[in-house]
Amino acid sequence: MRQTFCRHKSDHLVKSTLVVAPDGYILDIQGPYFLDGRNNDATTLRHELENDENLNNWFRPGDIVVVDRGYRDVIDTLEGLGLVCEIPSTPASGQRQLTTEDANETRLITKTRWIVEARNGNLKSIFKLLNQIQQIHILPNIGDFFRIGGAIINRWVALSVQQVIDFPKLTIEFLKHLTAGVLQIELAPSYIQDTLQRNNEQKFQVEMLYDVDQIPDLGFLRARIWS
């Protein structure tokens, strides 16, 4: 239990680290590691680079690696592998703030790293188990749970129009029937009555159809309801 206690967070924690490609593909999920002060970001990454051959297979000399300031102590190791490291700038000694150029570069790096935070959020929002306090007996398997979740996210990717050739084309007539068909019109009065019964102070924004001369045209009245 002592190895899991993080003084910074004042709680018992373990940490998994994501290696994510620019398009959101999860290359690797490392760990989990204890957060007892010995396993900072730089230490864990150095350990993975030295012991995980599969991780090194992802990279080629000249590839750009974007990291945060927690990895500054492992920059030499990454550059020794031929990688180009981009890390947020820090003010020099006696410097109160970053220069305009350094600030813009730091902002660009932070925006580029957004995909890592997004994937972390995806894992915890899609798989509720990973966003909860875990029982101690689950810890030996928590790394596998994260990797299974990452594999599922990688499996389902956004398709382009060219990849879905047989997708049905929706005509204007079909969309009109779907949104303003007989069934929808018949349901509208009962839906409004139910809304009024639940909230007598409900406000409706009613819009009428006008022609090009701004003269009321016979047709539908559109009522916008805030639920």
Image (cartoon, grey):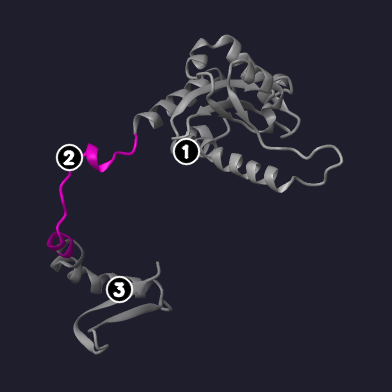
- The residue tagged 1 is 122
In the rendering, at what x and y percent does residue 204 appear? 37, 78
Q: Residues within 10 Å of mark 2 (few under 14, many from 20)?
A: few
Kind of element beneath mark 3: helix
Viewer-proximal residue among 93 and 144: 93
Q: Quadrant of residue 37?
A: top right
Q: Which residues are magenta?
A: 157-176
- Quick check: 184 above or below 170? below
Amino acid type, callout 1: Asn
Gap between marks 1 and 2 measured at Cα: 29 Å
Quadrant location of the C terminus in the rendered image: bottom left
Q: What is the secondary structure assignment of the residue under circle 1? A: helix
Residue at x 24%, y 71% (from the top left corner):
188
Q: Disc 2 on helix, strand or loop?
A: loop
Q: Label 2 sits on what residue type? A: Ile
Label 1 neighbourhood size at 10 Å, few (<14), some (14-19), many (20+)?
Answer: some
Of the two numbered discs 3 and 1 on the same chain, state the one appearing first in sequence.
Answer: 1
Total numbered labels: 3
Residue 192, numbered label: 3
Disc 3/disc 1 C-alpha distance (Å):
37 Å
